[in-house]
Amino acid sequence: MDKLLARFLEYVSIDTQSDPYSKSTPSTEKQWNLAKKLVLELHQIGMQEVSIDENAYIMATLPSNMEKDVPTIGFISHMDTSPDFSGSRVKPQVVENYNGEDIVLNKAKNIVLSPSYFEDLEQYKGQTLITTDGTTLLGADDKAGITEIITAMEYLVQHPEIKHGTIRIAFTPDEEIGRGAHKFDVEKFGADWAYTMDGSQIGELEYENFNAASVKIKIEGKSVHPGYAKGKMVSAIGIANEFLGLLPSREVPEHTTGREGFFHVHKLKGEIELAEIELIIRDHDSGHFEARKELLKDIASKLNKKHGDCIHLKIEEQYQNMKEKVEPVFHIVEIAEEAMLSLGIEPIIKPIRGGTDGSQLSFMGLPCPNIFAGGHNFHGKYEYIPLESMQKAVQVIVKICELTAVQIQSNGKRKKS
Ligand SMILES: [Zn+2]
């Protein structure tokens, strides 16, 4: 059996689901099970400086095989799987030479992966698909990324004729609960830039994500007998309603796409005395993002004037658009693009409507675009990945190492061709 496939099947069989309610790192003990295995494997394939810290962050080096100085680059993926769906006892199914028809994931439960619903399947006719058995997620997000990075490093170790600079790799815990980058030691990693192998379908290349903030609004009212309330009652529910009515009604997730930002009210509860609203703000454009925050403040102060100081607004920053940090070093995107094109892969470059670990890492000093790992339908039972996409991702990693060594000078500037 293909070594890449065997590796992937082994990793997904280890449950590494993370837990947003845990305060520890990693958030679940079981992530150590995969972490320890990966450390052994990195030694086995001949990586150097293999390290794992007390928070289960793994790092390793493939030393340069060149005389001259070239930039050090990195590849990163995450070990945990989403808390949204079970990752316990994953039993992957391998569908060879996919015929383009429905795939029965689970006969007993009548769970079917169908191209009539998931149209992307059609492009993989004739390929080898790895699916779930309908009871768990697959964990291609992001064990495919780990598999691809390890396999690419093994290939480079075995092919010293391919010239490359120092390559650093890292595997992190807890990406799915937004903490993958928190305890990442950028200085220790020591790369000039890196790529997360954590995108979805083949060709994806991403260097733009949302600016993100979360907002809590607390409204205090005054309860009075409703029959005698004229001029006295202050209804927190009524003011919450007024507040929400002043938000732009079309700027919500269900009406926006591409680079359009939104307000998303995801929680609302209220009584006369107290109402609470929770929402998130998302926008790729930092100016628009600021304007959205200002709008909330304006509404609050307007209503505070009208009703007496009753609204408390708390805005918390979450993450920023990495574009700001990637654009000044745009050759790191161009190299990935060129690597894909040279392998016959059509790059799909589009803004992420979310964030990645790379967005945080970029602001921590490690510019970090995101590259496809190959899977589809993450975080649920319909997750699947074509083996051929994983093989291509391995080739992309190898190619990026190669191109960086040839095209980029040690000062990080691109050679004129
Ligand atoms: Zn992921």
Image (cartoon, rainbow, N blue to C red):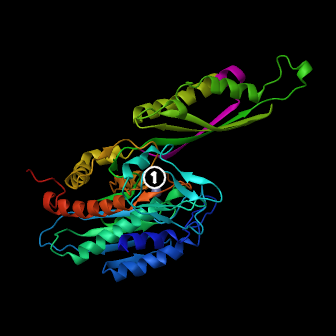
**In which image quadrant can residue 265 be found?**
top right
Q: Nearer the viewer, residue 191 or 114?
A: 114
Residue under label 1 = 376
Residue 192 seen in this snapshot: no
Quarter of the image for the N terminus: give it: bottom left
> Can you say whether 342 is above or below 186 in the image?
above
User: At numbered mark 1, what does the secondary structure look like: helix, strand or loop?
Assistant: loop
Q: Residue furthest top?
A: 230
On the image, the x and y values in percent for residue 74 come to 31, 63
Q: Is residue 188 magenta?
A: no
On the image, the x and y values in percent for residue 46 come to 30, 81
Q: Residue at x 45, y 48 (%)?
A: 355
> Can you say whether 394 is above or below 290 in the image?
below
Count of numbered tags: 1
Q: Nearer the viewer, residue 403 or 113?
A: 113
Q: Which residues are magenta?
A: 303-320
> Can you say whether 38 is above or below 125 in the image?
below
Q: Residues within 10 Å of mark 1 (few under 14, many from 20)?
A: many
Residue 106 seen in this snapshot: yes
Q: Nearer the viewer, residue 102 or 167?
A: 102
Q: Residue at x 25, y 76 (%)?
A: 157
Position of 229 with respect to 77 (left or right) is right
Position of 107 with respect to 68 (left or right) is right
Position of 192 with respect to 38 (left or right) is left
Q: Residue furthest left?
A: 417
On the image, the x and y values in percent for residue 141 come to 47, 59
Q: Residue at x 77, y 30 (%)?
A: 221
Find out if the beta carbon at label 1 lies less than 8 Å from the nearest ligand 1 atom. no
Q: Amino acid at mark 1?
A: His
On the image, the x and y values in percent for residue 82 come to 55, 58
Q: Is residue 317 magenta?
A: yes
